[in-house]
Image (cartoon, rainbow, N blue to C red):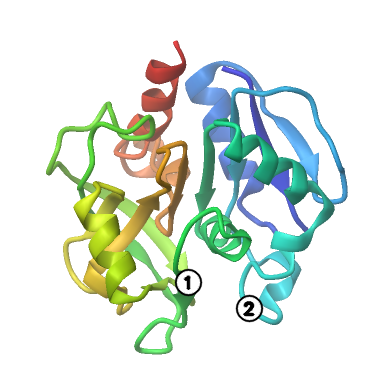
Amino acid sequence: MKSAVIVFPGSNCDRDMAVALTKVTGQKPVMVWHQDTDFEAVDFIALPGGFSYGDYLRCGAMSARSPVMTEVIKRANNGVPTFGVCNGFQVLTETGLLPGALMRNANLHFVCKDVRMSVENAESMFTNDYAAGEEITIPVAHHDGNYFADRDTLDRLEGEGHVAFKYTADINGAQRRIAGILNAKGNVLGMMPHPERMIEPALGGTDGRKMFTSIMNRLG
C-alpha cells in the first residue's frame, strides 16, 4: 500500500504516522510538504496531528487553505482513502470534506491520556478489522476536540452509519460522544484519538493497528 503523509508547519505527529505506516504496511510513505501543489499517485493519504500554523484563527483553518489541499480534496472526492487524525480531523472539517467542527474542550483544558472508545461502524474501509461494538483504548492529546454539528447533521451521521467511533465516556464535551466520523462515500475518516500511537506492545497496546490493517484489507 503506497501512502502519503501531508506535513504542515507545526505538524508534530507526522513522524508518528510515518513510522506506523512503515511498520504496518512495510512501505515508507511519501512525505508531502504543504506548499506542494501535486504529489505522486498513492493509495492512501494521511493528515497527521499537531498544531499546524500554531492553531491560529481556528485549528486547521489555515492548513485547509494550503496549496497541497486542493490536490488532497480532489483526490478524496475521487475516492482516494483519506484519513485525518486530531489536527488532521480539524483540517478535514475546515475543508468541508467532513461536516461539523471541532471546538474547545468543554472544560477548556488540554486532554492528554488513553481513552476508551467503541467501534460504531465496523464495515468501513478504515474499521473492517474491528468488531461492531468492540471497545478499544487509544490515546488522545487535544485542546479542541469537542465535536459539534447541528441536530440534523448528527441524526444523519448516526442514522446513516457515518459515526465510526464514540467515546465510552464524556472526555471533552463532544456531542453524542463522537470521536470519529466518515463522509457519505466512506472514503474519508476524521478522528481525534491517535491510533498511530497504539500499534505495538512497546507503545502500550495494539488497538490502533487495526485501523491500518483495515485499509490494507480493503485495498488488497
Verify CB contact (< 8 Å) between mark 2 and mark 1.
yes
Which numbered disc covers residue 101? 1
Number of marks present in the image shown:
2
The residue at which mark 2 appears reads as 58
Q: Distance between the residues labelled 2 and 1?
A: 10 Å
Residue flagged by tag 1: what amino acid is it? Ala
Res 10 visible: no
**Mark 2 secondary-structure assignment:** loop
Q: Quadrant of residue 208?
A: top left
**Mark 1 secondary-structure assignment:** strand
Instruction: From the viewer's side, name the closer residue of 206 and 80.
Output: 80
Which numbered disc covers residue 185? none
Q: Residue at x 40, y 61 (%)?
A: 140
Q: Residue at x 69, y 40 (%)?
A: 74
Instruction: From the viewer's side, name the closer residue of 176 and 141.
Output: 176
Classify mark 2: residues with Cα within 10 Å, few (<14), some (14-19) or many (20+): some
Q: Residue at x 73, y 50 (%)?
A: 69
Q: In which quarter of the image is residue 158?
A: bottom left
The answer to whether residue 184 is left or right of residue 98 is left
Residue 49: image x %, image y %?
57, 56
Q: Quadrant of residue 5?
A: top right
Residue 84: image x %, image y %?
53, 49
Q: Residue at x 63, y 78 (%)?
A: 58
Res 147 visible: yes
Residue 194: image x %, image y %?
44, 51
The answer to whether residue 160 is left or right of residue 220 is left
Classify mark 1: residues with Cα within 10 Å, few (<14), some (14-19) or many (20+): many
Q: Which of marks 2 and 1 is in front?
A: 1
Residue flagged by tag 2: what amino acid is it? Arg
Residue furthest out toward the top:
220
